[in-house]
């Protein structure tokens, strides 16, 4: 909000007007905080010190969600920070949809293949065990 207030004071624009057109990457503080980089150069130990640098990966993920899944806010739909595209829902709902429609079916498929592989392996071992013992393989 400080960036908008400074721009409003400096150029005489209304803050509400600036909120519709400005995004977080338009503010100098965002670039200084490392928000333009996908990875932070500082370690996670910087968290809790008031620095946003320790959260660069999380910022990059939230930006990706806003720009590609048309969401805004995390728990509840809010104003988007990075994207100008109209948001449809909160980003937590967008992530839940991705898990429900993409991750869950693939995870179920992996589990099914594992169960079939285990079952076939068990049957093969039970059937081949006596044959292998007759052939002299003692296992």
Image (tube, rainbow, N blue to C red):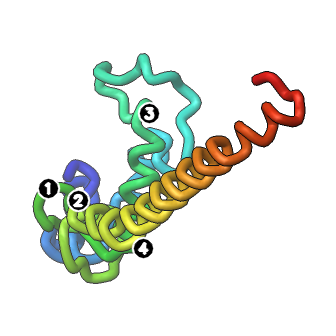
Above or below for 25 versus 30: below
> Residues under labels 4 and 2: Cα distance?
13 Å
Quarter of the figure with residue 24: bottom left
Residue 117: percent from left, percent from top: 59, 54
Q: CA distance from mark 1 to mark 3?
A: 23 Å
Mark 1 in CB contact with mark 2 (< 8 angstroms): yes
Q: Are marks 3 and 4 in contact (CB under 8 Å)?
A: no
* Residue name at image x 31 percent, y 19 percent: 49
Residue 48 placement: quadrant: top left
Check disc 2 and report the residue beneath it.
Answer: 92
Q: Tell which tag, 1 or 3, sits nearer the viewer.
A: 1
- Separation (CA) of disc 3 from disc 4: 23 Å
Which label number is shown at residue 75? 1
Query: For mark 3, does the 10 Å Cα neighbourhood hold few (<14), some (14 to 19), or many (20 or more) residues?
Result: many
Who comes first in sequence, dot 1 or dot 3? 3
- Judged left or right of residue 66, residue 119 is right
Mark earlier in primary sequence (1, 2): 1
Residue name at image x 13 percent, y 72 percent: 16
Tell which tag, 3 or 2, sits nearer the viewer: 2
């Amino acid at each position: 909000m400080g960036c908008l207030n400074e721009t409003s004071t400096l150029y005489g624009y209304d803050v509400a007007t600036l909120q519709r057109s400005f995004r977080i990457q338009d503010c100098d503080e965002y670039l200084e905080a490392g928000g333009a980089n996908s990875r932070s150069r500082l370690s996670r130990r910087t968290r809790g010190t008031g620095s946003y640098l320790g959260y660069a990966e999380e910022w990059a993920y939230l930006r990706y969600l806003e720009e590609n899944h048309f969401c805004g806010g995390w728990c509840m739909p809010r104003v988007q920070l990075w994207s100008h595209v109209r948001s449809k829902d909160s980003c937590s709902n967008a992530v839940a949809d991705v898990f429900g429609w993409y991750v869950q079916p693939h995870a179920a498929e992996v589990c099914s293949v594992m169960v079939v592989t285990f079952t076939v392996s068990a049957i093969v071992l039970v059937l081949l065990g006596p044959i292998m013992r007759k052939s002299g393989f003692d296992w």
